[in-house]
Image (tube, rainbow, N blue to C red):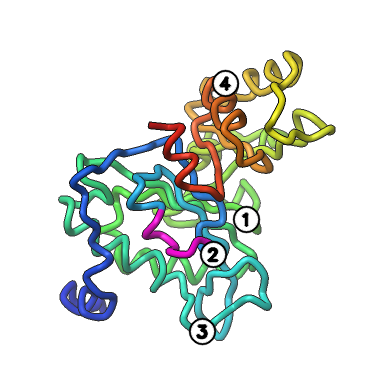
């Protein structure tokens, strides 16, 4: 049975409903490994990030948020750190996560294959409330031909080297790639990219947009030049571990 909204508020504290007097929505901002922030969810949410990322494991029948299995702590559950704060804020903003009727993407990196079934059950219990949240699964995903066996509250993070059927592509709103796919030399974010690498990224973005899919590249540096370059090249989501720095650039 669902817990009452008042129970949410008392259990989690009033700090989950954040003051929005100077709120600015930043749809391209992606909080990479958000759970490692000093204030998971809260920091990215207060800055209006369009996407927030969490890695999840299964431990004692519960979805736990951690970067590595050995980092699991009993109090760091996906329900407590992400689902319940979302539910509280959805009620505050007419069914939307943010004021101004803005949605949010929650990118969930499945570290255990069995996590998908636990997650689906948890989210389906709140399906009506969560209509304006995009839950996109990454990591240990099922095969594309199995996507449609899962509830539509879940969608999937695609890869540029996979060809999806039209039916499966409808469940893939996002295409992600490792920066090394565009440049094996890597990038420190302090010098401009070559024209060749920029053109590869532009092609990636163009092809995804032709399929009505958004784009993300992981493994990019946390520098001002990197943020500005990725923004100029049309990436839909720009990841960062330094949330304040990225928010300033995307102002």
Secondary structure at numbered mark 2 = helix
The circle drawn on residue 233 is 4
Location of the N terminus (image quadrant) = bottom left
Specify which label sits upstream in the sequence, 1 or 4. 1
User: Quick one: label 1, few (<14), some, or many (20+) residues within 10 Å?
Assistant: many
For the residues labelled 1 and 2, say whether their Cβ atoms are less than 8 Å apart. Answer: yes
Badge 1 is on which residue?
A: 141
Horizontally, is 176 left or right of 196 in the view?
left
Does the magenta portion include 41? Answer: yes
Give the distance between the C-alpha atoms of the residues marked 3 and 1, in whole angstroms. Answer: 25 Å
For the residues labelled 2 and 4, say whether their Cβ atoms are less than 8 Å apart. Answer: no
Tell me where residue 69 sits by quadrant: bottom right
Expressed as whole percent of the image width and height from the top left, the position of residue 85 reads 31, 65
Which residues lie in the magenta part?
37-43
Specify which label sits upstream in the sequence, 2 or 3. 3
Q: Is the magenta stretch mostly helix, strand or loop?
A: loop
Give the distance between the C-alpha atoms of the residues marked 3 and 4, in whole angstroms. Answer: 41 Å
Q: In percent of the image, x 75 and y 18: which residue is there? A: 194
Give the distance between the C-alpha atoms of the residues marked 1 and 2, in whole angstroms. Answer: 8 Å
Secondary structure at numbered mark 1 = loop
Badge 3 is on which residue?
A: 74
Secondary structure at numbered mark 3 = loop
Badge 2 is on which residue?
A: 116
Expressed as whole percent of the image width and height from the top left, the position of residue 199 reads 69, 16
Give the distance between the C-alpha atoms of the residues marked 1 and 4, in whole angstroms. Answer: 28 Å
Q: In percent of the image, x 55 and y 42: which residue is there? A: 239
């Amino acid at each position: 049975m669902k817990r009452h909204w008042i129970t949410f508020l008392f259990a989690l504290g009033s700090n989950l409903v954040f003051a929005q007097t100077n709120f600015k929505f930043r749809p391209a901002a992606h909080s990479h490994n958000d759970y490692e922030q000093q204030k998971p969810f809260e920091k990215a949410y207060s800055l209006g990030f369009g996407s927030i990322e969490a890695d999840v494991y299964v431990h004692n029948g519960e979805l736990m948020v951690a970067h590595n299995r050995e980092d699991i702590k009993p109090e760091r559950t996906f329900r407590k750190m992400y689902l319940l704060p979302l539910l509280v804020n959805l009620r505050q903003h007419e069914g939307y996560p943010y004021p101004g009727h803005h949605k949010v993407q929650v990118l969930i990196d499945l570290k255990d294959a069995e996590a998908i079934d636990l997650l689906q059950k948890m989210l389906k219990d709140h399906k009506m409330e969560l209509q304006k949240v995009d839950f996109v699964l990454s990591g240990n995903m099922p095969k594309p031909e199995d996507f449609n066996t899962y509830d539509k509250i879940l969608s999937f993070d695609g890869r540029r080297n996979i060809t999806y059927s039209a039916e499966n592509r409808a469940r893939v709103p996002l295409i992600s790639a490792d920066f090394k796919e565009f440049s094996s030399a890597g990038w420190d974010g302090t010098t401009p990219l070559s024209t060749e690498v920029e053109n590869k990224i532009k092609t990636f973005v163009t092809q995804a947009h032709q399929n009505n899919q958004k784009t993300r590249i992981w493994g990019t540096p946390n520098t001002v030049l990197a943020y500005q370059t990725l923004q100029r090249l049309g990436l839909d989501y720009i990841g960062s571990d330094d949330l304040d720095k990225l928010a300033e650039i995307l102002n």
